[in-house]
Amino acid sequence: MSCCILREDPVHLRPIRPPKIMKKPHRRLHRFYSPHPLKQAGQTLLMTPAESLHMTQSLRLGSSDLCLLFDPSSTESLAQIRSVTSEGKVEIEVVEILEPNQNTPLYYLRVFVGIPQKGKMDYLIEKAQECGVDEVFPMETERTVVKMSASNKDKVVSRWNRITLQAAKQSGSLKLSQIHKPQKFDQITHHFPPEDACAVFHPVAGAIAFNEWVQSLKHDKIETAQNPPVPPFLNLFIGPEGGFAEGEIHQLIQLKAQVVTLGKTIMKVDTAFVGIIAALRMLGY
C-alpha cells in the first residue's frame, strides 16, 4: 500500500512528493602556515613539526586530504597532503595558487598599547590579528602595573607569536601581525617619527570625537591619493588601566598626536582596543 498523500482533485491523482533534503555544505578547509614561499602548482614542501603534528594528530588529516596554505608574503594556495615522513613531517603539494580576496586597507596600522593586567594582553594580541593590525607595540607606561624582566619578555613574545599564528589560521587573514617586545613609553616616543599620522585615545576635555577624527583620516587620504600605492602609517596609542599620565599625553601632543575621545563613558583597555581597531578596519582604514 502506498503511503503517498493524494490530492483531493480526482482528475489529478498524482502523489505530492516530499521536499528534497539539501545536502550539508562542505566544511571549510583547514588552514596552515608555511614558512616556505608558495610559488606555483606542483610545488612540494615539508611542513614544520608543529604544523605536521597539528595536521596528523589533532585534526587526523591523512594522505590526499585537501587544505589551505598561506606564507609570509600573504600568498595563499590550495594544497593536498601527499605523505608523512618517518620523522613525522607532512609532505604537501601545492595544487593551485589562489587569487587574494582581501582588500588592502588605506593605512598601515600600528597600535601602541599599555600592557593590561590579568593576562588580557593575550586576548588583545588575538584580536589584533583578527582585525588586521600590522604591528603591535606593548608598552610599559607610568601607570602600567605589569612589569617584566628581560627573560620574561622573550618568553611572552614567543607565546604572543603562537597566538597570532593560531588566530591567523582560524580567521582567514593572510598577513601575520608583527608583535614587538615590550618597551618603556619613553623608549618608544624618543625615536618616534613625527611625520606619521598619530592619535592617542584619552578621555579629556577638548579631545576630538572619534567620528570626527575618522572623517579627518578620510580627508587626508583623499589629498594623498596621487602618491604611490604604499599605505601610510597610522599610529594609535591606547593607555593601560588608569590611562596615560599627564606628562605622557604632553609628549604625544608634541609628536603631533591628536587626542581622541570615545564618548562619555570610560572603557576598559580591552574594550577600547577591540572597538577602535574593529571600527577602523570595517570602515576600510
Image (cartoon, rainbow, N blue to C red):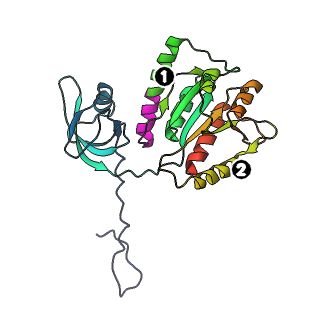
| Image quadrant where residue 233 sits | top right
How far is mark 1 from mark 2, CA to CA? 35 Å
Which residue in the protein does label 2 denote? 212
Residue 110 at x, y percent in the picture: 56, 36
Numbered circle sitting on residue 157: 1
Residue sitting at the far right: 205
Q: Is residue 174 magenta?
A: yes
Residue sitting at the far bottom: 11
Is the N terminus in the top left, top right, bottom left or bottom right quadrant?
bottom left
- Residue type at numbered disc 1: Val
Residue 241 at x, y percent in the picture: 70, 26
Image check: 95 left or right of 185? left
Depicted 137 relative to depicted 169: above or below? above
Residue 168 at x, y percent in the picture: 43, 37
Residue 117 visible, this orientation: no
Q: Earlier in the sequence, mark 1 or mark 2?
A: 1
Which secondary structure dominates the residues rendered in magenta? helix
Image check: 167 left or right of 185? left
Select label 1 or label 2 by which is in front: 2
Residue 37 at x, y percent in the picture: 29, 37
| Residue span colored magenta | 162-175
